[in-house]
Image (tube, helix red, strand yellow):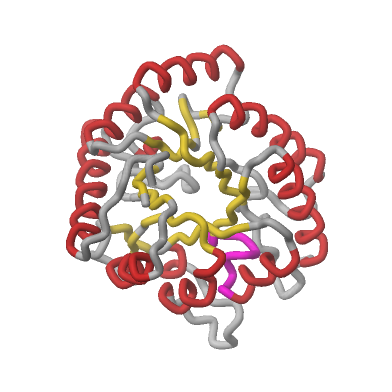
Amino acid sequence: MYLTGFADEVSQDLDKQIAVTKELGWNAIEARSVWSTNIHDIGEMEFDRICQSLDESRIRINCFGSTIANWSKHINDPFSDTLAEVERAIPRMQVLNTKLIRIMSYARCPGEEQHKEERFKRLREICSRFIDAGITPVHENCMNFGGMSWHHSLQLIDNVPGLKLVFDTGNPIISQDYSKPTGEAQDPVEFFKNIREHVAYVHIKDARMEKSGETFLYPGDGDACIPQILQMLFASNYQGGISIEPHMASVFHDPNADSVPVEESYKIYLEYGRRLMSLLNGIGYTPSLYDEA
């Protein structure tokens, strides 16, 4: 098991992302955006600068947090747009020797009709292209079809060969369970227990729903049952990545969310990583460096 994180929540400056990663004693970043642009959209000169900085600092990109089929994309969007992102991502991942890519299953549709067969068809093509390139696609339970409930995640597994899952601990807390008529919030432990045999990667996020809306907290302080889920991962001898996504200083998918100065976001990210390491240490779950796990 190794530790990593969405260091773009500290800063869009790559040097800051590298610095906070090294200060935590880690050697991997889950790449999403640098200089406010996703890795599969950034220019060639900028991508070369990224590669050089990573090589010089001996920091690796363990997973690519792509925007492919994410919550901002709709199932009626031209599929050619998605495939273009896939084809831009593959050679860059190969240059970086990155073996995991986070994808989603397009935004939820209003109402009951979710166009499942079209989603499955598209995801089969997306996953086939990545798998043929030696890359494992992992689907996140976020604001998309597969995140509507654990049943929906398993529908993807049943219909998309080669797809694995990335389980985000905090997303169930802020998500309606569309498999239940009552429309209650999802249960993170129930969700995890039902999908864990397909989980190849984990995001650590903690949250609580307040009257005013969702609040993101340090790991173990919210309702995501993170200590319990870490214990289950340890008991099952999980050896994959555990990636922090604090959302406390910035929320990637909410451009209207308040942000804090880089100095403060840096401190939050450091404290978040240290608290996660403390939780792991408390149960004797010892991380390795990436590529040593």
Please give the name of the residue rendered at 75% of the width and 66% of the height, measured from the top-left corner: 159
Q: Viewer-proximal residue, 131 or 275?
A: 131
Assess whether residue 147 is covered by the magenta stretch. Answer: yes
- Outermost residue, bottom direction? 181
Residue 221: give x, y in percent of width and height.
23, 65
**From what the image shows, is residue 268 above or below residue 173?**
above
Residue 75 visible to the viewer: yes
Frontmost residue, 263 versus 293: 293
Image position of 52 (left or right of 113): left
Comparing 196 with 71, the one in front is: 196
Instruction: Give the residue drawn at x 61%, y 29%.
Output: 94
Prevailing secondary structure class for the magenta stretch in the rendered image:
loop
In percent of width and height, residue 293 lies at 38, 47
Magenta stretch holds residue 245: no
Q: Residue at x 60, y 18 (%)?
A: 43
Residue range corresponding to the magenta coloring: 141-150
